[in-house]
Amino acid sequence: MNQVKTIFKNMSWLFVSQVIAAICGFVWTILIARYLDVSDYGIMNFAISFVGIIAITMDLGISTHIIRHIATDFDSAPKYLGNAIPLKSVLSFLTFFLALIILILMNCNELTIQITLLFTLEQIFKSMIGLFNGSLQAIEEGKYQAIGNILLNIILLIFILVSIICDLGLYGITLAYLVSNFSVLIFLYIAVKKIISKPNFEFDIEFCKKITLYSIPFALTSLFGMLLYSADMVMLTNMVGEYENGIYSAAYKLISVISLFYGVYSAVIFPVMSRFYKNEKKLLVVSFEKSIKYIMLIIIPVSFSTMVYSADIVTLFFGQKYYPTSSVLSILMWSLPLCFINGICLNVLNASHKEKYVTLSFLVATLFNIVLNLFVIPKYSYDGAAITSILSEILLTISYFYSIYKLDALPNKKLYLDLFKIVIASVILYSVLLLLNLNMWLALPLGIIIYFAIIILIKPFDEDDKYIIKEIIGKN
C-alpha cells in the first residue's frame, strides 16, 4: 500500500496549497465584487467564461493525453513536452485572433473586447501552466504544483490589492491575473527542466499529428465541459443583462472556490487510476468507491448547511447589493456533490481509455443545458440558469454511471448504503440548524460537532477504511 502513502503525500502538499488558494480566492472575490460595480463585475465574468469556452483551441486535449502517457512511461516526457510546447504556442496564437473575430461578430462594446482579449492572453499562460503541472503530477511530484499554486494566489492577491488601492479599475484587476500567471509559468518551466529534464524542443509534424489525433476526444470533452459550465453566464449577459450575470457570477465564484479542493484530489488520483487500469483493475474500482465516499462525507453536509445560511454568506462576502445572489447560491450549492461525483467518474473513464464515453456524455448534457437555458433564462433569469445547471449535472451523472456499468466497474452496493447514511446525517444537521436558528458563527462549530457525532453513531466506515487511515498515519 505504498501507493496510499504517495497519494496522501501529494494530496497533503496540494491540500495546503488549495487551503491558501481558497483563502486568497475568498478574499479577492470579496474585494473585487465590492470594488467593481455589478455591471463591471458581469463584464469580467463574461470575459472569463467566454475565454474558458474558446480556450479549448489552445490545447485540443493534448495536455490530458500527454499526462496519461507520461504517468505510464516516464522516459517519454522530454519528447512529448518538446513537441507539445511549440504546438500549443501556435494554437494559442490562432486562438487569440479567433477570439477577436468572434467578439467583433457578437457586437461587443470596446471595454468588453479589450478585457476579454487580456483574459485570453492570461488563458494562454494558464494553458501552459496546466501542461507543466500535469507533467509534474504524472511523475508524482505534486509539491512543485503546490508551490506554484501558492505563488500564483499570493501574487494575484497582492496585485489585486495594489489595483484597488491605486484605483486602477477593471483594467488593473485584469492585469493582476496576467502578471501572476506569467510569473508562475516561469517557475514551473524551471521546475520541469530540473525534475523531468529539459524538453527536447522540436516540431515533428507527424508526431504532433499523432498526439493531436489521440487527444481529440479530450478536446471535445473540454469544449463541452466549458460550454456546460460557462455558457449560462454568456447567455445571461446577452439575454437579460450584465447586472443579472453579475448576480449569478457571485454565487458561481463562491462555488468555484470550494470546488478547488476537488482539484487537489483529481490531480493526484488521475495518474494513479491510469496505472491501476494498466496493472491492477480491481484497485481502480476500489479507488472509485473510496473517492466518492470520502468526498461526499464532506460536501453533502456543507451543501445542506449553505441552504440555511445562504443569505448571511452572500451579505457577509459581497454586501447587500448582492442579496439576490442568496437564492442562486442555495440552488447552485447542490451542483457541488454532483460535480464531484461526475469528476470522479470522468477520471475513471479517462484512465480506462474510455474518453469517448466522456465526450458523448458531455455532449448530451451540454445540449440539454443550452436548449433549456434558452427557455428558462428569459423567464426566470439567474434562478432559472441555476436550476438548469443542477438538471444538467443530474443528466451527466446518469450518463456516466451507465458508461461505467458498461465498463463493469460500478461500485459495490455497500457504497450506496454508506451514502444513504451520510445523507441522513446531513438531513439531521440541516433540521437542527433550522430549529435552533442560531447566528452563523455559532452554528459553524456546533454543526461540525453534531454532524460528526451522528457519523460516529451510524458508522459508515468499514475495515478497508480503517486500514487506509492506518496506512496513511503509518500504523500498519
Image (tube, helix red, strand yellow):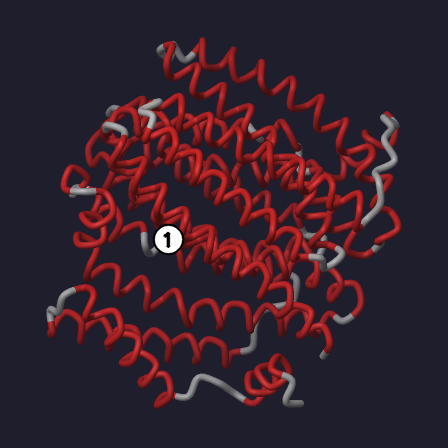
* Closer-to-camera residue (65/445): 445
Identify the residue at horizontal 62%, vertical 79% (top origin): 472
* Closer-to-camera residue (446/410): 446
Q: Quadrant of residue 143?
A: bottom right
Identify the residue at horizontal 73%, vertical 54% (top origin): 138
The x, y position of residue 269, in whole percent, is: 63, 62
Tell me if residue 70 comes above or below residue 278 in the rendering.
Answer: above
Using residue 452 as the reference point, say whether residue 275 is left or right of it: right
The x, y position of residue 354, in whole percent, is: 68, 52
Q: Quadrant of residue 380?
A: top left
What residue did someone put label 1 on? 335
Q: Quadrant of residue 285?
A: bottom right
Tell me if residue 465 comes above or below residue 355 in the rendering.
Answer: below
Q: Name the image quarter holding the N terminus.
A: bottom right
Using residue 347 as the reference point, say whether residue 419 is left or right of it: left
Identify the residue at horizontal 85%, vertical 54% (top origin): 73
Identify the residue at horizontal 35%, vertical 23% (top origin): 170
The x, y position of residue 304, in whole percent, is: 27, 65
* Closer-to-camera residue (147/290): 147
